[in-house]
Structures are given as C-alpha cells and as structure tokens.
C-alpha cells in the first residue's frame, strides 16, 4: 500500500532537486519563480479560492434549504446521490458537458446571443481560458460542499434552538450567536477542502485547455510530456513539490478545523 | 423547530434555482447528442453506437470501457481484502492506532493524482517487469486514490455499530475469529462495505489523471480520445456513465436507509 | 491471533501475486534465427518474404498518433491490414509528436508500447535515442536530403501550411493581419501546441515568414500569436476533426492535407494558402528501439515506402518523399496528383539547425505569449 503512495511522492519531490545527470541542484526549484510559472500558481490560487468561496456559500445555502426534510425522503436521497455523482463527475465528461453548454457552439451561448444579444465570447474565448474554468469547477465544488457540510448542519441540536427561544432570542440571534459560531469551523474546514480539491484538479482543465499551461497541474503535464523538447528535465518534480507544500498547509488547516468541529458535535 | 428550518418558500427557491442551474449542462449534453451541425435533430448518433458496422472504430473504446470495469473490480477487491480487515483489526485490537490509520487514509488527498503520477512512472516501470504490463496493475495506484472515501464510508459504519461488544459477545459464546468476522461483523458492516465498494467504483470509473499521464487506456481517456473524432458518441457515453454512476449511488442511499430502519 | 491473521493475509496476497504473475505471461520473441530488433534491412531477415513471415508471426502492430484522416492514414492502415493480415492497434490518434515519445517512455517493456513513430522535425532531432536504424528496400529512391544516413529516421511526406476556415461563419482570410480583425473573435486555433506538435510548430513558422521574418528566428511568429491572443482571437483548443465538424474551431492553421480532408467531409469548410512564402516540412518515420513487434514495425516501413502507400499519400493531399522516383518510373497515381496539383510558390522549409533553434525559442517564449 505504502509503496504506491510513499515512494511515488518521494520520487516526485526528489526529482525536483536533481538535474538530468543526477547531480543535486536547486535550479529546478528556482524555475518555479520564473514569472510564467509563478503566474500559473497565482492562477491556480485564484481559481481555487473563488470556486471554494462561491461553492461553499452556495453549497451551504442548499444544505440549509434541506434542513427539516426527511432524512430518508426522496428529496434528500436524490440530492445526496446527485451530489455524490457530480462531485466525482470525471473531468472529461464535465468538459464535454460545458462545451455543449457554453462552448463556441454551446446551447447557452447560442440562446444568449439569440434571446439577449449577449455574446459571452465577445472579448475572446471564454470557456477555454482560466475564467471559463470557474463555472465548470463550481459544478463539482457545490456538490462537494453539500456532501461535506450537511452532517454539520444536521448536528445542530434542537435543544439549542429551544434554549434560544426560551431566552427570548429571535431567528436572527439564533443564527448569528449560536449556529454560526458552532458551524464556523466546519464551514471553513469544508471551504479549505474545496480549495484543495480545485487546486489539485487536473482532468477538467486538461480536457478543456489543450494549449499552454495556465494552471499548475497543466504545467506539470507539459513538463512531463515535453521533457525532451523543453529540456527542463525534472521541472515536473519541482512543480510537484510546490503543489504538495500548498496542499499540506491547506489540509493541516482543515484537520485543525475538523477537530474543533467534532468537539461540538460529540 | 421553526427557528431552525427554513420556510417552504425559501427552501424551494434555493433548491429550484440551484437545481435549474445544475441541470442546464445536462440538458445541453442531451440536446447536443441529438443535434446535427447544420441544424435539426436526429437519433443517428445514438443508434450509431450500437451499429455493428462501426465495431472496428469503437473496438478500442469498448476495450477501454472493459479495462475500467476490470480496474474497478480489482480496486474493490483491494479495498475489501486489505483495507477492511485492517480497519476492523485496528478498531478491535489496536484502538490507539486509529489516529494513525486515519492519518494515513487522509494523506492521499494531500498528494493529488497529478503529483502522484510524476513519481509513479518509475515505480510502474518496475511493476511492469515484475507483474507484466497489463492494465489491472493500475488498481494499486487506484487503491490509494479511493482510500479516503472508502475509509470514511467504512469508519462511519464501524462507529455506528458496537463492534467491540458484538465480537466479545460472540467470543464468549465460543465463536472463533473467522466466525466472528464472517457471521457477526460483516453482516453488520454490510452498509459501510457496500458504500465503500460503490464509491470506489465511481471514483475508478471517473479517474483520468493517472491513466492519461501513464498512457494507459481506461474509460475516461477513451472518452477524451473519441471526443476528438466523434463528439456525439463521446457526449452520449458521458451521459450514460453519468446515469450509471447516479443509479449506483442512489442504491447506496436506499441501502443506507434500509439499514437504518433495521438497526433499532 | 494477530500473527495468524497476518500470516494468512500475507500468504494469500503472495499466492495471488504469484498466480497473477503467471497469468501475465512472458513475451516470447518471434521465432527464427533473426533478432528482428536489430535488423537494419530486409536482407537481415533473408529477404522481404522472410520479413513478411516474421511480421505475420508477430501478428500485431502498435501505431500511435496516426489519425485516419491525416494524409489518408486511414486507407493506408486498412491496406496494410488487408495485405498482410496483421492487426493494427491504433493508439491515441490526436496526440502530438512529443507525446508519442512520452508514451514510448511510459509504456517501455509493455505490449502496448508504440512500434513506429511519425514525428515532426523538432521532436525527431531531439529523440534520436529512441530509434532503431533501418533502411527500406527502395532506400536509393529517397533523396539524400530526406533521410538520416543510417536510417534512424526518414522523411515520409510533406505538405504546405494552410489556413482552413468555416466559410459559413467567417470570411476568407487573405493575410495574417486579417486574422487580427473582429470577424475572428475567439476563432483561430492550431493543431496542437507548438512546443509539442509538428503542425503547430509549422504554423508558427508560417507566421514567422509571413510576418517578414526568416526561419532562423521564430520570434516574429510567436509575436503574431501573442497579438492574436491579445485581440481575443486566439482559441487555446486543439483543432481536431471533431471540433471542425462541430464548429468549435472556425479557423484552423493546419497542414494542407488535413484541411483538404476536412473540406471533403465538413459542409462549408474551405482551405486557403496565404500569398507569399509557403512553409513546408516533411514528417519523419522512425522505428522504436524497444518495439514490442520489431518485425511488423519494419514491414510497416517497407510498406509505407512502397508505391502503393506513397500513392495513397497523394490521394490524401500530401506529397510523398519518393514522388520524383514514382514520376520517373511512371508508377505515380497521375489522377490523384492532378487533383492535388503541384506544390508551387516560394517554398521554405527549415534546416535541422533552424528547427532546433526554433524549438528552443518556442520552449522559452510560447507559454508566456499565449497566457
């Protein structure tokens, strides 16, 4: 088991420190600070952050809307299953779905032009650039939020609501002074999870964007494929290291918040 | 309690809006699968998939789909034969190792597939020499990828069922370990195990990164490839896979609710 | 108890692994006294017939990145399968030359590794370590300038860089500057990434010479695409038959043979070659050093350079490397050649040095230009 996790990870990171001939070097790491590569890290951050925040808010709203429905009811089961599927919805299939929707010949593209005269490709192609990744990523971010956050909302004890009512509080005070503080760790934990998910996402972008490497996973792709031509051997290893650093920080934050959540829930 | 739950109006506005937004791409895909570039609609794209004349063109596609199912089966086997016993063991015998096991099973999220694959290529060149170059060896890597999901599914079940009590009771009644495992624990863990199995299948079927960058052929890489020559078949297959995964996960939901009723 | 379980578990896994190893099977090399993997010509096999036998014993050929509608490869592959009764396993038709080499790396030692490559110039020059030398039977018919002296790689066919466009949605472009206009918003695509794919590399080459530059320095070409990107006209999508058919890529820089092929199947697709310098470049055929089917790979090369296949290239809109020899011997498919027309105009093609320099320039500057 560990063979397939520990060794590849070590190898991936280690190759970042080695040149073609096997000598130790920091040149590849320095390569990360190349403006083009740095800007891909920025793009990755930006996309991940935006989709994490929007996904978290929308997902939380849907969870809220589901409060009070029967746990085994049809509505809940359907939304649960749909969310599970969409959260795992392979990137390739997602790409096709959005090409059919907002690609150059997409259903929505044409509808918008015919009905409202609005052309989303007015200033250049939308779907195939980094901003175009936003709606696509949201498609799996929101379901992921629903899956991870729902248990927290379900953990809100009715006793707290009753206590709030007994002490003369309103709906507003309940939410602001009881529910939000309790839910905050879980909410922000889930948000971090969403960020990690978007940051490490490869398949969707790979299926949509075939030119250039606007986000870090795509940079790794071109580093792996064009090792011979680009001559920057082992750049992929350096990039992998960069990604792992980010992920470790994010996941550490997530586990800290998780521990605080369980404190209230148990 | 009225303070907590939203009013039906709010509920339906939120769910309705989000529901509509999320069904647009699906509708677009369905629309596309029936459309002709010059305008108009046709069922030809759907029938083409099952037309024996196109067998040669789709030969690789069906082979890749077969690969995906084989990989799913082997991955599930790995989960059931390695992860499940380990988790049960830790739960029963080594409760202190629980944190460690949990940590190990969360790590795969920290090391995303795209990073893992950078280091996997040299590992697999060794694997190929030892176990042959067949595609099922990818299942080892997939076993790692599904670890967090399978772990969560089985753990939730393990926490809900009084495993320790049950096994001790069975032991005092004279059962040996095999009986305890097979006839006492497994039936109670059925929900979690099935959930883990189904999730693993869904993840494996949707996996693209590792297969693509190691040049192996599975459902997703085949989809991408066929999408570059015949976009309609690709969209149709995507819709079918989506429906298949949805039904699969709906079944878990039903199983979960059935189990819940029986447990009290 | 733990130990007992552990022992059972470990032995089960071990048995499983052993069993599966047995099932995996070993690759028995083709029977015979000849090591096909080191043969450098048909004579090493004892004649063409012996080569055919050895190839048929292998029974399969793994090709990669050979789309059916690329210079008529579809017909060529079908003809090969029929003539020799060898099954062709067609992998990854739409990947780039660089990805072909990456696949060879990833699949080394496996049954699915590619047997033969068809690569653009830049990638070929960089990947000599992957090739095995081989000289086909009609080696002398190939001009010296079109082959590497030991047969590591050989030119196979060429065409000119052209612009294909969907006449139902966009007007005909008559110059590079036209493409910077509003009519082409989000419309112009390449066939691949210039740092990986020969066709895209050539597109930048065409842009270079059309912008008044020379093939010594591809910077003017890169600058043009940067301008195109700033204007919002550049579409970072690989043009494929699917995108052309569905209309996602209304304007495509691609080889004449590819655009011509699209024009026969897609309603409204037209092809134009810009006035001024015409960029041409040969693709290169090579045999993989670690080919799982070495005899079949060599037979494939023999077949490709035979008159049958070379004429099929003409049908596909490409100019085969032995065209002079075919015309001299009178075996050329004159009808197809007449339909295609001669390759005329101010033809430019990069030398090996120019290609290497261009590859370096692109590696440094392309990503930033189209960000």
Image (cartoon, rainbow, N blue to C red):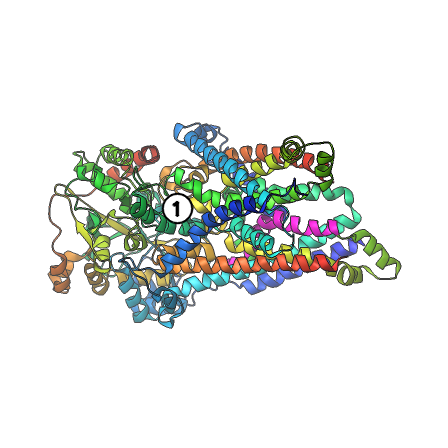
Magenta extent = B133-160
Check the image and report above or below for A255 versus C124.
above
Q: Is residue A127 left or right of residue B185?
A: left
Measuring from the top left, give residue C178's x and y in whole percent: 18, 39
Task: Identify the residue at horizontal 27%, vertical 64% (top origin).
Answer: C75
Q: Which residue is mark 1?
A: A208
Check the image and report above or below for C116 versus A194.
below
Q: In the depicted view, which residue is nearer to us: A213 or A174? A: A174
Q: Residues within 10 Å of mark 1 (few under 14, many from 20)?
A: many
Q: Chain of mark 1?
A: A
Within the magenta stretch, is there residue C233? no
Q: Is residue A222 left or right of residue A152?
A: left
Q: In the depicted view, which residue is nearer to us: C340 or B234? A: B234
Determine the image quadrant of residue A126. Answer: top left
- Residue A153 shows in this picture: yes
Q: Is residue C338 left or right of residue B219?
A: left
**Which residue sits furthest front?**
A168
Determine the image quadrant of residue B254. Answer: bottom right
Check the image and report above or below for B238 versus B1.
below
Check the image and report above or below for C192 versus A24.
below
| Disc 1, SS | helix
Measuring from the top left, give residue B144's x and y in whole percent: 59, 48
Measuring from the top left, give residue B69's x and y in whole percent: 53, 61
Quarter of the rendering occupied by the C terminus of chain C = top left
Q: Is residue A26 left or right of residue C194?
A: right
Quarter of the rendering occupied by the N terminus of chain C = bottom right
How many callouts does the rendering have? 1
Measuring from the top left, give residue B54's x and y in whole percent: 36, 68
Q: In the depicted view, which residue is nearer to us: A127 or C304? A: A127
């Amino acid at each position: 088991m560990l063979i397939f996790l520990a060794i590849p990870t070590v190898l991936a990171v280690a190759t970042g420190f080695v040149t073609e001939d096997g000598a130790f070097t920091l040149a590849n790491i320095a390569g990360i600070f190349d403006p083009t590569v740095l800007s891909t890290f920025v793009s990755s951050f930006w996309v991940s952050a935006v989709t994490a925040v929007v996904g978290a808010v929308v997902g939380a709203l849907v969870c809220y809307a589901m409060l009070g429905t029967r746990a085994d009811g049809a509505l809940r089961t359907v939304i649960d299953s749909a969310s599970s599927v969409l959260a795992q919805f392979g990137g390739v299939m997602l790409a096709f779905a959005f090409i059919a929707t907002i690609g150059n010949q997409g259903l929505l593209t044409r509808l918008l032009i015919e009905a409202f005269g609005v052309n989303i490709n007015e200033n250049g192609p939308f779907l195939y650039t980094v901003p175009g990744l936003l709606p696509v990523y949201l498609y799996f971010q929101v379901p992921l939020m629903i899956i991870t956050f729902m248990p927290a909302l379900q953990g809100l004890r009715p006793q707290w609501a009753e206590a709030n009512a007994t002490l003369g509080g309103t709906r507003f005070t309940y939410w602001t002074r009881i529910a939000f503080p309790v839910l905050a760790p879980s909410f922000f934990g889930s948000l971090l999870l969403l960020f990690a998910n978007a940051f490490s996402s490869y398949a969707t972008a790979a299926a949509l964007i075939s030119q250039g490497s606007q986000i870090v996973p795509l940079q790794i792709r071109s580093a792996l494929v064009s090792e011979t031509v680009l001559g920057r051997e082992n750049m992929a290893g350096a990039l992998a290291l960069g990604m792992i650093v980010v992920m470790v920080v994010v996941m550490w934050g997530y586990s800290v918040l998780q521990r605080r959540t369980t404190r209230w829930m148990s | 309690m009225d303070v907590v739950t939203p009013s039906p109006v709010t509920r339906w506005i939120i769910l309705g809006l989000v529901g509509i937004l999320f069904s647009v791409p699906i509708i677009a895909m369905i629309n596309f699968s029936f459309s002709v570039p010059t305008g108009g609609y046709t069922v030809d794209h759907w029938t083409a998939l099952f037309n024996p004349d196109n067998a040669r063109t789709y030969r690789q596609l069906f082979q890749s789909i077969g690969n995906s199912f084989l990989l799913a089966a082997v991955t599930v086997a790995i989960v059931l034969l390695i992860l499940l016993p380990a988790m049960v063991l830790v739960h029963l015998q080594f409760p202190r190792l629980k944190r460690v096991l949990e940590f190990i099973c969360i790590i795969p999220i920290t090391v995303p597939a795209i990073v893992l694959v950078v280091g996997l290529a040299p590992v697999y060149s060794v694997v190929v020499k030892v176990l042959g170059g067949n595609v099922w060896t990818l299942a080892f890597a997939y076993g790692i990828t599904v670890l967090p999901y399978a772990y969560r599914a089985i753990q939730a079940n393990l926490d809900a069922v009084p495993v320790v009590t049950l096994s001790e009771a069975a032991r005092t009644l004279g059962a040996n370990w095999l009986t305890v495992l097979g006839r006492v624990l497994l039936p109670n863990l059925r929900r979690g195990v099935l959930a883990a199995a189904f999730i693993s299948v869904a993840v494996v079927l949707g996996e693209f990164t590792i297969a693509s960058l190691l040049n192996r052929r599975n459902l997703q890489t085949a989809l991408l490839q066929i999408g570059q020559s015949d976009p309609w078949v690709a969209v149709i297959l995507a819709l079918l896979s989506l429906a298949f995964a949805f039904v699969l996960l709906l079944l878990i939901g039903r199983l979960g609710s059935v189990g819940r009723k029986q447990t009290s | 108890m733990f130990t007992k379980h552990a022992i059972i578990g470990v032995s089960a896994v071990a048995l499983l692994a052993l069993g599966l190893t047995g099932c995996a099977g070993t690759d028995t090399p083709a029977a015979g006294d000849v090591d096909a993997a080191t043969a450098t010509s048909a004579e090493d096999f004892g004649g063409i017939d012996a080569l055919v036998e050895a190839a048929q014993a292998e029974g399969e050929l793994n090709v990669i990145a050979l789309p059916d509608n690329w210079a008529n490869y579809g017909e060529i592959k079908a003809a090969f399968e029929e003539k020799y009764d060898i099954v062709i396993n067609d992998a990854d038709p739409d990947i780039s030359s660089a990805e072909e080499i990456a696949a060879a790396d990833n699949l080394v030692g496996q049954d699915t590794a590619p047997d033969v490559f068809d690569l653009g110039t830049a990638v070929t020059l960089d990947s000599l370590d992957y090739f095995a030398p081989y000289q086909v039977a009609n080696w002398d018919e190939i001009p010296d300038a079109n082959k590497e002296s030991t047969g590591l790689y050989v030119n196979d066919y060429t065409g000119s860089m052209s612009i294909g466009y969907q006449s139902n949605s966009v007007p005909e472009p008559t110059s590079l500057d036209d493409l910077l206009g509003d009519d082409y918003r989000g419309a112009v695509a390449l066939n691949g990434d210039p740092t990986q794919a020969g066709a895209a590399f050539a597109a930048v080459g065409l842009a270079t010479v059309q912008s008044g530059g020379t093939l010594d320095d591809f910077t003017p070409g890169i600058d043009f695409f940067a301008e195109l990107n700033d204007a919002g006209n550049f579409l970072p999508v690989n043009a494929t038959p699917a995108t052309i058919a569905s209309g996602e890529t209304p304007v495509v820089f691609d080889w004449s043979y590819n655009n011509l092929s699209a024009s026969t199947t897609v309603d409204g697709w037209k092809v134009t070659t810009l006035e001024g310098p015409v960029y041409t470049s040969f693709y290169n055929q090579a045999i993989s050093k670690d080919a799982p089917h070495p005899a079949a790979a060599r037979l494939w090369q023999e077949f490709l350079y035979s008159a049958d296949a070379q004429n099929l290239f003409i049908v596909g809109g490409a100019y085969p490397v032995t065209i002079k020899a075919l015309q001299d011997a009178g075996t050329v498919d004159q009808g197809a050649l007449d339909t295609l027309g001669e390759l005329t105009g101010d033809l430019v093609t990069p030398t090996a040095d120019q290609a290497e320099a261009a590859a370096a320039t692109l590696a440094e500057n392309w990503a930033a230009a189209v960000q």
